[in-house]
Amino acid sequence: MDEKAATTRPAEHRTIDTSVPHSARIWNYWLGGKDNYPVDRAAGDAYTDVFPGIVTIARSSRAFLARNITHLVAEAGIRQFLDVGTGLPSADNTHQVAQRIAPETRIVHVDNDPMVLAHARTLLRSTPEGATAYIEADVLDTDRILKAAAQTLDLSRPTALILSNILGHVATYEQARSIVTDLMSALPSGSYLSVNDGSAGIDPVFEAAQNAYNESGAVPYNLRTVEEITSYFDGLELLDPGVVSVPLWRPDTTGPATQVVGEHGGLARKP
């Protein structure tokens, strides 16, 4: 671990509840990861029994994020990232993608899952030139997030805010909009917002599976309409092609044919 890396709280202070499925661990399972428990795999399998396409959505989401980060570092010159709702470490974490291109990049990861905290060492493996940090905080606690992030990032400089599959966990759309506004208001001109989330109105089978999951006792995830996801970018300059199904956002032309899935996202610059 690089000496610049830091975490705000010790990993031992919270226990991991393995009796209830957790979305971060289920997502990890769908991505092919190993940081999950039987209860998560059972919930994940129950979901795919109804809607096998969720695995495609999970992997398309991860690829979308990597393409966003690559553009931000290689084309936009961004060297600071605030990744809120990081999730469990897997292939191509934000800091890995960014620091492969520009080793001096600084990244702050934010999550409130004790299992993510237990794996924070992976998120803190920075290049010597750059820095990484992990903040344990709820997405609703924007003041804490910004105060802690300022220990690693210079928030007077352009910063990319990453909100990947986290706003759906916020109970109401109004709360989600408020989170985006609070965080982006603290960042200067030239900063960027990257958002992707599960979308309503695209695939009724997906929506039925998600409704059943939400009623299972697990932490709910709320699908938003494409119009609602697009409105997160109000006041910002959306980059082409705008808010689209994530496989269609600047796809890798060497990869498989793209398809519309119930996950939409975009990338925008703060003027």
Image (spheres, rainbow, N blue to C red):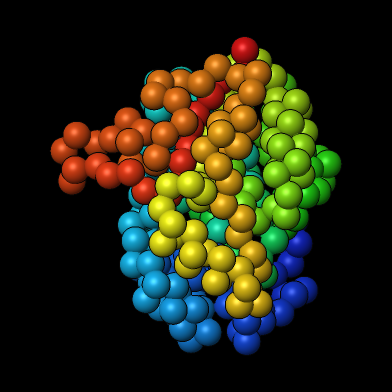
Residue at (48%, 47%) from the top-left corner? 201
Q: Is residue 113 above or below residue 124?
A: below
Image quarter of the N terminus: bottom right
Q: Is residue 93 above or below residue 41?
A: above
Of residues 249 and 127, the one nearer the viewer is 249
Image location (x, y in percent) of residue 247: 33, 42
Q: Is residue 12 visible?
A: yes
Label count reads 0
Q: Is residue 97 left or right of residue 157?
A: left
Q: Is residue 85 visible?
A: no
Residue at (57%, 52%) from the top-left corner? 223
Residue at (38%, 67%) from the top-left corner? 51
Image location (x, y in percent) of residue 124: 56, 54
Q: Is residue 72 above or below residue 58?
A: above
Quadrant location of residue 33? bottom left
Image quarter of the C terminus: top right
Of residues 137 and 132, the one nearer the viewer is 137
Q: Is residue 136 left or right of residue 64?
A: right
Q: Is residue 125 above or below residue 121?
A: above
Of residues 24 and 246, the one nearer the viewer is 246
Image location (x, y in percent) of residue 101: 38, 33
Image location (x, y in percent) of residue 98: 44, 38
Residue at (34%, 61%) from the top-left corner? 53
